């Protein structure tokens, strides 16, 4: 996470919670990425010049005079041929010992798909998980919310659903 010449460094955080911090800044965009004391963060709320950042690794140990640098862009991910079959961490960095991905850098995130443009749900998705198949039948084109505490294995459950699904498309959204 390098810095560019002439980036303004803010050093006056007004409020810190377990996952967020707030400070005064101007010219910052919604969903913009930032570095807070070297930790990756994202703008989640703007009220006038009061900016709230979600710090992905938590705020423990961050002081009110920590350095905050806004990076000037939304979250990005490099995409290319090397993505297939690879394993990455939450920041899009390879964790499988393979090389860095060489390709095009694109912004990720943004608004969800317009429901009017989605295919009408029609084809049953059999997941093999009784609690889902019997109580909350899934169909193609449907968004599937998974609610879980951070210490629950929701990634494994989502992977199991995706692998067992007998449908062409399966859209998964995670809501913590």
Image (spheres, rainbow, N blue to C red):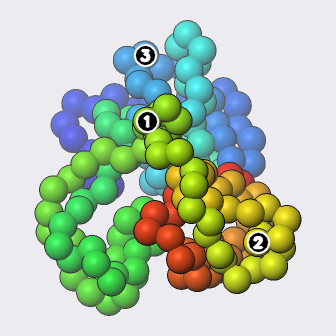
Q: Residue furthest top?
A: 48
* Local secondary structure at mark 2: helix
Residues under numbered marks 1 and 3 in contact, where contact means CB atoms less than 8 Å apart? no
Q: Is residue 85 left or right of residue 25?
A: left
Q: Residue furthest bottom?
A: 97
Q: Position of residue 142 (x, y in %)?
A: 59, 52
Residues under numbered marks 2 and 3 in contact, where contact means CB atoms less than 8 Å apart? no
Q: Quadrant of the C terminus?
A: bottom right
Q: How many tags in the picture?
A: 3
Residue named by callout 3:
26
- Using the numbered discs, state the Cα–Cα distance from disc 2 to disc 3 in whole angstroms: 49 Å
- Using the numbered discs, state the Cα–Cα distance from disc 1 to disc 2 in whole angstroms: 26 Å
Answer with the quarter of the image where residue 139 lies.
bottom right
Residue named by callout 1:
117
* Local secondary structure at mark 1: helix
- The disc placed on residue 162 is none
């Amino acid at each position: 996470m390098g810095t560019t010449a002439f980036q303004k460094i803010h050093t006056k955080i007004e409020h810190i919670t377990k996952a967020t911090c707030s400070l005064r800044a101007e010219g910052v965009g919604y969903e913009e990425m930032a570095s807070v004391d070297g930790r990756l963060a994202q703008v989640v709320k703007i009220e006038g010049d009061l900016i709230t950042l979600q710090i992905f690794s938590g705020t423990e140990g961050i002081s009110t005079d920590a350095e905050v640098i806004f990076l000037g862009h939304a979250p990005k991910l490099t995409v290319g041929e090397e993505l297939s079959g690879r394993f990455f961490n939450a920041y899009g960095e390879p964790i499988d010992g393979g090389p860095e991905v060489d390709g095009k850098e694109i912004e990720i995130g943004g608004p969800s798909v317009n429901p009017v443009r989605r295919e009408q749900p029609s084809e049953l998705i059999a997941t093999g998980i009784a609690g889902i198949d019997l109580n909350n039948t899934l169909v193609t084109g449907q968004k599937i919310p998974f609610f879980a505490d951070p210490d629950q294995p929701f990634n494994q459950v989502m992977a199991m659903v995706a692998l067992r699904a007998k449908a062409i498309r399966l859209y998964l959204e995670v809501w913590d």
